Amino acid sequence: MKAINDNKWFEKLRVNSWEVEILIVAVILAFLFNVPDLISDRLAALDVSNHFDFRRSNPNEPVPFWFMLGLIKMVLYILLQICFFVSKVTFCSYVFFRGFWVAAIGLSSVFSKGIDAKRLNYSSHFNKLLPRDSFDNFILNLDNICSAIFSLGFLIAFYVSSMIIYLCFLILAIGSIEYLSGNASDLIANIVSIVLLVTGIIFFLDILFFGILKKVKWKVFSYPYSKLYKFLRIITLFFMYESVYYLFISNIRRRHIFIFWLIFALFITATIFSDKSDGYLTFPSNTLKTKSFMSQDHYEDRLLASAVNFSSTDYPFINSEIISESYLKLYIPFHPVIHSSLDSACGITSKILAGDQNIGKEILLNCINSQYAIYIDTDTIVNDFIFYDYSGNDISLSAFFMPILVNDYEEGKHVVTVEKLFYEHYDYIEDSTEQSGWFTDDEDEVKLTKYSDSLIHIPFYIYR
């Protein structure tokens, strides 16, 4: 009797699972479209928070642990961004199909008899094209598609998580060899890095293509790969969702897989070859921050009017594109992404910041004043920034603020230019000769550069 009751409960749960699915998807989409924007500065900070740690006082010293940790942070940042994007697409697709499913159910309740072929009275050629299955089967198929997309969203998230775990394991393994053995382990580190990288690629490609390598019956390959697979499935925690994965791939039709990859390939191809700007007049994109383009990102009144939560904006902005008063307001948002860059540029150390907090704040303000150059047209503005807590209209933003007098400027068009004087990125020089494994030994092999947003132009007009 207990087994019968359990089966009834389980069957009822399966029938009503769509209610739980919609609730979970609503929470996930609310997170994906709101929380990542609020913490994007924290995620971006992972990319550069340790990028100055490669500059060792002695090039012959082992690679510092913090540099290895910085690499892991960078990988986490990239994969999390990919995971957020793919999850948005997947769960938005689920909402689309589930909404279509609800509409089909509503329509079936209005027209319970289904498709009336007699009333359509098509010719025999078109009558053959009418669906033979009942409308109820169509609804059931839609429900199955929705459940499959729902499961696929979580499988993708778990798959990316496994990649993150494996890459962290790879970086720690190789970095530990470099750190513990020094330069004597160059050959070992190279061999280990190649072996781990190749085996990881094989493992994740095998999962991505539904176990195609597991179909190889050749014992010389299948036996060692099975041992490797057992090890990697534990390291990557793949075993935790392995049953769901095999349930999914063992029941999905191969033609559906082919159609999916074909649509994906066509989408990528269309994206690459869709640029028809050559030979045509085109309106400049919002990414072009020039003296002749007014971007919404740079004007406070336009940001507020668009009801956009700009708490995570990276760009400097002024109060309006048309200034009728004797001054304009300049805001430079502060984000952790520039923290290590400012520390390096101004020589700020944790020892200095650990002392008097008031002194630390003055040091930070002095650093900002010295590391930003502000111009109006060709005139250099003397910096005098203060800390500004921008709040209101559901917006919370930490910024540096400075009013700028414009009494002496004539009416008409002018440009505020904000230039970062510090470096935020590094590249390896191509002609470097001495290298040690994954890491360079010569400090001169690294070239510091600036990001594309290091020079921002904000056009505005003065009319009194």
Image (tube, rainbow, N blue to C red):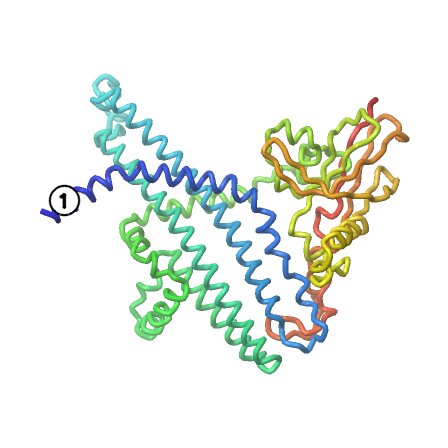
Residue 16 visible within the image: yes
Q: Residues within 10 Å of mark 1 (few under 14, many from 20)?
A: few
Question: Residue 440 falls in which quadrant of the image?
Answer: bottom right
Q: How many marks?
A: 1
Instruction: Give percent across and percent down for residue 215.
Output: 30, 63
- Callout 1, which amino acid? Asn
Instruction: Give percent across and percent down for residue 176.
Output: 54, 74
Q: Give the residue furthest to the left.
A: 1
Residue pictured at 32% horizontal, 49% vertical: 254
- As helix, strand or loop, the secondary structure at mark 1 comes to helix
Residue pictured at 53% horizontal, 79% vertical: 188
Instruction: Give percent across and percent down for residue 392.
Output: 63, 32
Q: Give the residue furthest to the top.
A: 119
Q: Give the residue furthest to the bottom.
A: 184
Give the residue pinned by disc 1: 5
Q: Give the residue furthest to the front.
A: 356
| Viewer-closest of 233 and 134 | 233
Residue 449 visible within the image: no
Question: Residue 105 falls in which quadrant of the image?
Answer: top left
Image check: 352 left or right of 76? Answer: right
Residue pictured at 80% horizontal, 48% vertical: 369
Instruction: Give percent across and percent down for residue 429.
Output: 71, 65
Image check: 227 left or right of 413? Answer: left
Q: Is residue 304 above or below residue 240?
A: above
Q: Is residue 382 above or below residue 230?
A: above
Q: Is residue 233 above or below residue 90?
A: below
Where the C terminus falls, by quadrant?
A: top right
| Viewer-closest of 118 and 366 | 366
Q: Is residue 37 above or below residue 68?
A: above
